[in-house]
Image (cartoon, rainbow, N blue to C red):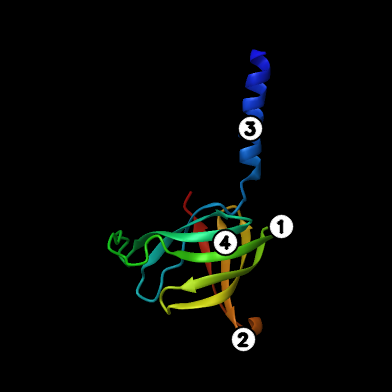
Amino acid sequence: MKHSIIAAAALCVFSTVASADPVDGLWKTEPGDEGGYLHVTIAPCGSAICGTIDTAFDGNGNQQLSYENLGKKIIWDMEPEGNGAYDNGKIWAPDRDKTYNSKMTLDSQNALTVKGCVAGGLVCRGQTWTRVQ
């Protein structure tokens, strides 16, 4: 009986780990025009993937505790397509206060290409984010 309980508990732990999406985690954006950057937490939200602004830094790497967009979703409705591809999402660009159609590609375990597009995907702007943890 004791072995059955331990086996069931181990199965629960392994199934939770196995169900985590490879893109889940904390990501650092590329620096903006003035050198500031963000840390974004990417995690499941329903059946999609979302990203929330976790921390903001200025051009000198100093944490900006008063950044007005902390906790705001920057990515939402991103659908996993398989093989590290994500599509049909939205991304909000804080520097322009605009929302774009978005897609992402997990290039490696520690590099994520994030793109926002307008005009049916003809005009896109993107960044490569690096994994923090």
Residue pushed farthest right? 82
Q: Are marks 1 and 3 in contact (CB under 8 Å)?
A: no
| Labels 1 and 2: the sequence-earlier one | 1
Q: Residues within 10 Å of mark 1 (few under 14, many from 20)?
A: few
Q: Residue at x 62, y 39 (%)?
A: 16
Report which residue position mark 3 lands on. Answer: 12
Report which residue position mark 2 lands on. Answer: 119
How far is mark 4 from mark 2, CA to CA? 23 Å
Q: Position of residue 49 (x, y in %)?
A: 58, 58
Q: Residue at x 64, y 81 (%)?
A: 121
Q: Are marks 1 and 4 in contact (CB under 8 Å)?
A: no
| Labels 4 and 2: the sequence-earlier one | 4
Label of residue 112 in the image: 4
Residue pushed farthest top? 1
| Labels 4 and 3: the sequence-earlier one | 3
Type of the residue with mark 2: Ala
65 lies above or below 18:
below
Q: Residue at x 72, y 58 (%)?
A: 82
Q: Is residue 28 left or right of residue 35?
A: right
Q: Residues within 10 Å of mark 3 (few under 14, many from 20)?
A: few
Type of the residue with mark 4: Leu
Badge 4 element: strand
Q: Residue at x 41, y 73 (%)?
A: 32
Residue 19: which quarter of the image? Answer: top right
Give whichever of 108, 78 is nearer the camera.
78
Q: Are marks 1 and 2 in contact (CB under 8 Å)?
A: no
- Which of discs 4 and 3 lies nearer the camera? The answer is 3
Report which residue position mark 1 lands on. Answer: 83
